[in-house]
């Protein structure tokens, strides 16, 4: 069974990755943007999206932010659902203002600087774009997965490992392995 985390970074992606690793999953997290690039390349060349990453069963932080922004989790979640039937999807989330503040402080401000260059705009415009992207993605995901049992909305500030364990439906999952890691000062 494959599990895809399809929320933005700075919403517990590392915490979820460590949770699944501790529970024996073969997990891949970000891979320096290569995960997002490989998904995109596979799509463009008509290959299964996970070609090159077949051995993994948990995927998180599928994004690239360099000279451009590629949110592969957003762009390909529907195709991942089609290509890999029976997979599970987790929309990791948190209050939007805390998410914005965490992103602004990520990498001592280097993350914001990259987005200012990518979008050719100032801090306030970046924040407005992030808010727009957030609302658009959440709305689209919630609409797409409405009423489906292979989807979990997971708030990193309210939910815990028990919610993930119940969602996966495996008694071997150790819920206590979930903890908040790699925090950025907000």
Image (cartoon, rainbow, N blue to C red):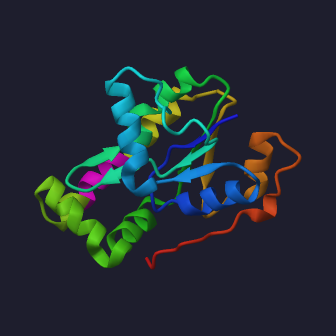
Is residue 12 at all visible to an observer of this figure? Answer: no
At 80% across and 45% down in the image, what residue appears? Answer: 166
At 39% across and 44% down in the image, what residue appears? Answer: 36
Image quadrant in which you'd find residue 86: top right
At 80% across and 58% down in the image, what residue appears? Answer: 175
**Looking at the image, is 18 positioned above or below residue 89?**
below
**Looking at the image, is 47 positioned above or below residue 135?**
above
At 54% across and 57% down in the image, what residue appears? Answer: 13
**Looking at the image, is 128 positioned above or below residue 103?**
above
Q: Main secondary structure of the magenta part?
A: helix
Residue 15, given in percent of the width and then of the height, sits at 61, 63
Q: Which residues are magenta?
A: 127-134
Is residue 133 at all visible to an observer of this figure? Answer: yes
Along the viewing direction, whichever of 43 and 127 lies nearer the viewer: 43
Horizontally, is 27 left or right of 38 in the view? Answer: right
Image quadrant in which you'd find residue 84: top right
Residue 69, given in percent of the width and then of the height, sits at 27, 49
Query: Is residue 71 in the magenta section?
Result: no
Quarter of the image for the N terminus: give it. top right
Quarter of the image for the C terminus: give it. bottom left
**Looking at the image, is 148 positioned above or below residue 74?**
above
Horizontally, is 114 left or right of 152 in the view? Answer: left
Along the viewing direction, whichever of 39 and 116 lies nearer the viewer: 39
Residue 149, given in percent of the width and then of the height, sits at 70, 30
């Amino acid at each position: 069974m494959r599990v895809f985390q399809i929320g933005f970074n700075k919403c517990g992606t590392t915490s979820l990755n460590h949770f699944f690793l501790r529970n024996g999953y073969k997990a891949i997290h970000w891979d320096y943007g290569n995960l997002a690039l490989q998904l995109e390349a596979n799509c463009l060349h008509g290959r299964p999206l996970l070609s090159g990453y077949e051995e993994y069963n948990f995927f998180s932080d599928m994004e690239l932010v360099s000279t451009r922004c590629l949110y592969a989790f957003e762009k390909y979640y529907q195709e991942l659902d089609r290509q890999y039937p029976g997979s599970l999807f987790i929309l990791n989330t948190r209050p939007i203002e805390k998410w914005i503040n965490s992103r602004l402080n990520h990498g001592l401000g280097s993350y914001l600087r990259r987005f200012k260059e990518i979008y050719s705009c100032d801090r306030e415009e970046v924040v407005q774009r992030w808010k727009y992207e957030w609302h658009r993605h959440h709305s689209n995901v919630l609409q797409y997965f409405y009423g489906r049992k292979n989807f979990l909305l997971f708030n990193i500030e309210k939910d815990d490992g028990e919610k993930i364990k119940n969602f996966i439906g495996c008694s071997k999952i150790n819920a206590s392995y979930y903890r908040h890691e790699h925090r950025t000062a907000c």
